[in-house]
Image (cartoon, grey):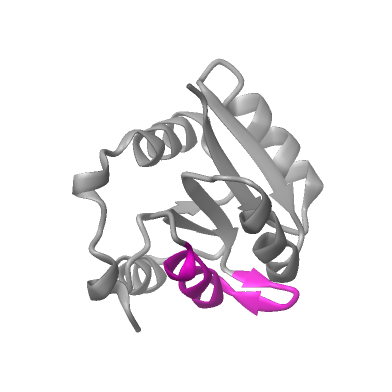
Amino acid sequence: MRSRILFISGHRDDARNLSQMLQSLPLILDQVGTLYHARTKLQQEDYDVILTEAALADGNWLDVLHLARESPRELEVIVTDPHADARLWAEALNLGAYDLLTQPFYQPEVRRILYNACSRPEYERYPMAAAAV
């Protein structure tokens, strides 16, 4: 069975590059440009992971984290940002994100992090109550 990843980004080129990086893995990447469209897509499809840019046209990664926690399905959230630093990484992990990917994307890192996030057993997932902000 293939795992699904929802990529929230206004940059179609990034989605195309990520799809190519993940091509040989059992992962399907769908892309939407806004938080609004992500909410709609999450109601239509079952996803395992959300990969989101830190800053979106209509929100930010914290809004995505809240959206994931509202889902009846447990979703891992991975944040990406071209200006990612240790502070953002620590904040994201402390608030319940699975990990942080820096840009430009480095294929081995992208493949490892996304594959592992999708493969993580349900019992190992971060407790939803602990992620409540």
Q: Residue at x 57, y 51 (%)?
A: 103
Q: Is residue 58 above or below residue 9?
A: below
Q: Residue at x 54, y 52 (%)?
A: 51
Is residue 44 found inside the magenta-colored segment of the image?
no
Q: Which residues are magenta?
A: 55-71
Q: Position of residue 72 (x, y in %)?
A: 44, 60
Q: Position of residue 57 (x, y in %)?
A: 75, 74
The residue at the far bottom in this view is 133
Q: Position of residue 119 (x, y in %)?
A: 34, 33
| Image side of residue 4 versus residue 123, left or right | right
The residue at the far left in this view is 123
Q: Is residue 3 above or below residue 1?
A: below
| Image side of residue 5 versus residue 119, left or right | right
Q: Is residue 4 above or below residue 7?
A: above
Q: Residue at x 47, y 75 (%)?
A: 66
Q: Position of residue 14 (x, y in %)?
A: 71, 44
Quadrant of res 42: bottom right
Q: Between residue 84 and residue 70, name the one nearer to us.
A: 70
Q: Is residue 91 above or below residue 10?
A: below
Quadrant of res 43: bottom right
Is residue 65 found inside the magenta-colored segment of the image?
yes
Q: How many marks?
A: 0
Which of the image's four quarters has the C terminus?
A: bottom left
